[in-house]
Image (cartoon, helix red, strand yellow):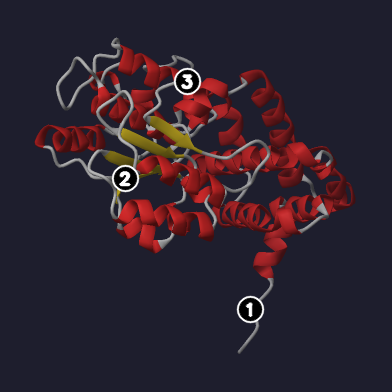
Amino acid sequence: MRFENFIGNRRVVERLRLKLREGRFPHGLIFTGPEGVGKRTFALMLAKALNCAESGPDEFCDECSQCRKIEAGTHPDVLTLGLEDEASEIKIAQVRSLLQMLELRPSEGRNKVFLVDPADAMNAASANALLKGLEEPPENSYFILLSPNPQSLLITVRSRSQTYPFLPLTIDEMRAFSSDELALRWSRGSIGKLKTLDLDALRQRRGVALGFLETAIRAGEQELRNLIGASAEIARSKSDFDPNMDTLAVLVEDLLYCSEGLTDKIVNVDLEKNLARLASEIEAPQLVRIADFLRTIEIHANNYGNRQMLTDMLALTSNTFVGKFADDIPGKSR
């Protein structure tokens, strides 16, 4: 695959190709953006362009021994610094080992390229160690740091690198990889998510989440006792809890789009009629409260062990009768 075949984020691609052509390629780069939007793929393309034996400064052939070794991950001058098995941080010993290689001449290619992925996994000690390499890198050495959360990087690391944000791909761009509209919309512009998405598992999880919302929203005053039990299925499994909450968040977002008449924006296009009907039964402010409570769960769930209590509270927050009751309570005077 050549640069011209890279899909999405064309402005970033062309800006860095221009720097390659003009001989002004930065020694430190930070690629930011969500997972699966092409950051690593493009970083390896740049490594090929910096070492290709056949093509010009802003292109690569993808066929010579240099390109093939980079693609296979066996090129001695293109190294990735990442998480070791079962580790949660990139260790300072890993960075020091990399810096020892920094002073050596390239063994096969023209340039050495060091990929740090994920860069936000560096702790303060390893980031400070890497800073030494970023401050005065040899002429033929380049660092490319990949991070979905650049604000977690040391400001000194960011100040010595040029940052390029990668945006999610558009639906039209994603159609180069799939024709399934539901899969495209659930992937949210991430090729990585699209390739790993299990639609059967998604539909099953979505059915449970939609059933919970329908029960929670429609339960009448005489059914509030039963409402508490509606959340049992989505709260039972710890491993499924976060995916269930994510699924609920997307469904609530779709309900908000339906209530505003923006049905072209909904993700669950195959459920449009059901969602429109459900959205007509609940006021927009109530939907906003549900969305806000889901964000609260996202923030606090890992520190709050009682998943059942959280989802019971979500069920009550979702209920139309309880919502109207809350709206009727006059605000406290100050």
- Residue 220 position in % (x across, y down): 80, 49
Say whether marks 1 and 3 touch (CB < 8 Å): no
**According to the image, label 2 marks what residue?**
29
Q: Residue at x 34, y 35 (%)?
A: 113
| Residue at the outermost left position | 22
Helix, strand or loop at label 3? It is helix
Image x and y of residue 234, in percent? 78, 39
CA distance for labels 2 and 1: 52 Å
* Residue 321 seen in this snapshot: no
Q: Does label 2 or label 3 sit earlier along the sequence? A: 2
Q: Amino acid at mark 1?
A: Gly
Of residues 201 and 11, the one nearer the viewer is 11
* Amino acid carrying mark 2 in the image: Leu
Residue named by callout 3: 181
Q: Which residue is mark 1?
A: 331
- x, y percent for residue 164: 30, 45
